[in-house]
Image (cartoon, helix red, strand yellow):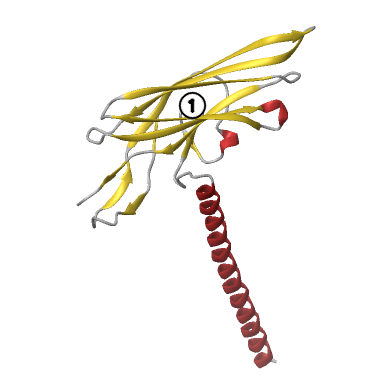
Amino acid sequence: MESSNKKLIIGIVVVIALIAASLIFISNSTKKSVGELIGKASKEEGQDTGQDTFNENNSPIDDPILAIGSSGGSGGGSGGGSSSSGSSSCPTQQISYSIQNIQKNIECLEYQGETCVHQSLDCSAEIYNLDNEILGTFKVEIRFIDRSQDYLIIGSQAKEFSLGPGEFETVQGSASLQVQNPELDCFFITINVPKKEICP
């Protein structure tokens, strides 16, 4: 009796170990596939996979749908990550920067009775180079959405500019939409941020 209990316990342990190993293998394969899909989608759009999205609180976030909200705010965020440069043995890292003073001005241009049927939105923000050494090229995109249509992207505008250490640039854009009861909003995405070598 005792011998059959030991065999049963050993059999259960082996089955659990096989299931755990299978789950680990599947988990690693899924992570790789998701990463490849994200990288492929970003390359198709011509964007760096390390892009940051900022909301009105100036906090970097991963989901563009979450990067929307009311006007105002200040603060900052900085990009991260590192990679190896082909010409140097030192890794590179994205420099620190922030998006501040996000302003959103919404105006209804046309009413039908008490219902707005044509709305305009002006958005602006200041992009700061927080690095004290690097001059580099930034590229920031403003995306305009209509919340009343399941966050439909109705347009985008991109601006590319160079900033020296401690400098800032104002990025602004506008959009308008003619639908019943539009709810326009905008958010900012950094497409390109300068990098610098981090040598020991």
Q: Is residue 53 above or below residue 118?
A: below
Q: Amino acid at mark 1?
A: Asn
Q: Secondary structure at mark 1?
A: loop
Q: Residue furthest top?
A: 113
At which x and y percent is residue 176?
63, 19
Q: Kindly identify which residue carries mark 1.
A: 57
At which x and y percent is residue 196?
27, 44
**Is 111 on the left-hand or right-hand side of 65?**
right
At which x and y percent is residue 70?
57, 21
- What quarter of the picture does the N terminus occupy? bottom right
Q: Who's the residue at 67% across and 27% down the image?
A: 147
Q: Who's the residue at 23% across and 55% down the image?
A: 88
* Snapshot quadrant of residue 34: bottom right
Q: Is residue 164 above or below residue 113?
A: below
**Is 190 on the left-hand or right-hand side of 194?**
right
Q: Who's the residue at 52% across and 41% down the image?
A: 62
At which x and y percent is residue 48?
45, 45
Q: Who's the residue at 33% across and 39% down the image?
A: 194
Q: Residue furthest right?
A: 113
Q: Nearer the viewer, residue 91 or 7?
A: 91
Q: Residue furthest left?
A: 200
* Snapshot quadrant of residue 121: top right
Neighbour tally class for label 1: few under 14, some 14-19, many 20 plus, Cα within 10 Å:
many
Q: Nearer the viewer, residue 57 or 198?
A: 198
**Is 72 on the left-hand or right-hand side of 144?**
left
Q: Nearer the viewer, residue 19 or 191?
A: 191
**Is 144 on the left-hand or right-hand side of 47?**
right
Q: Is residue 29 above or below residue 77?
A: below
